[in-house]
Image: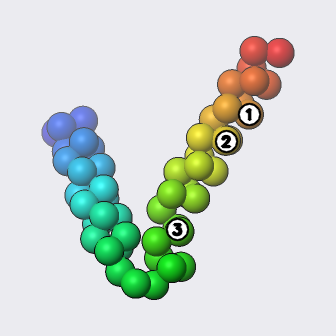
Amino acid sequence: MQIEDHPRAEKLLLLGDRRKLNLPNHKVTVTFPTSCMLVQIAKNAIDNAVQR
């Protein structure tokens, strides 16, 4: 059940973020992409550390 519900939750989060992107407030529009980039940077740093 948890594995099946997880992708659905991600889809709902993506829909929520898309709705936020339509808002005129720039602070809201920046939060989602920057958080994704920070996660990717962290993953890359961990991968590089593990490879070394």
Q: Are marks 3 and 1 in contact (CB under 8 Å)?
A: no
Q: Secondary structure at mark 1?
A: helix
Gap in Å between the C-alphas at discs 3 and 1? 21 Å
Q: Are marks 2 and 3 in contact (CB under 8 Å)?
A: no
The residue lying toward the viewer, choosing from 28 and 1, is 28
The residue type indicated by label 2 comes to Ile
Residue 44 lies, in percent from the top left, at 67, 32
**What quarter of the picture does the N terminus occupy?**
top left
- Residue plotted at (28% across, 71% down): 19
Q: Residues within 10 Å of mark 3 (few under 14, many from 20)?
A: few
Looking at the image, residue 21 sits to the left or right of residue 1; the answer is right
- Residue plotted at (46% across, 71% down): 29
Looking at the image, residue 22 sits to the left or right of residue 32; the answer is left
- Residue plotted at (53% across, 68% down): 30
Q: Are marks 2 and 1 in contact (CB under 8 Å)?
A: yes
- The residue that disc 1 covers is 45
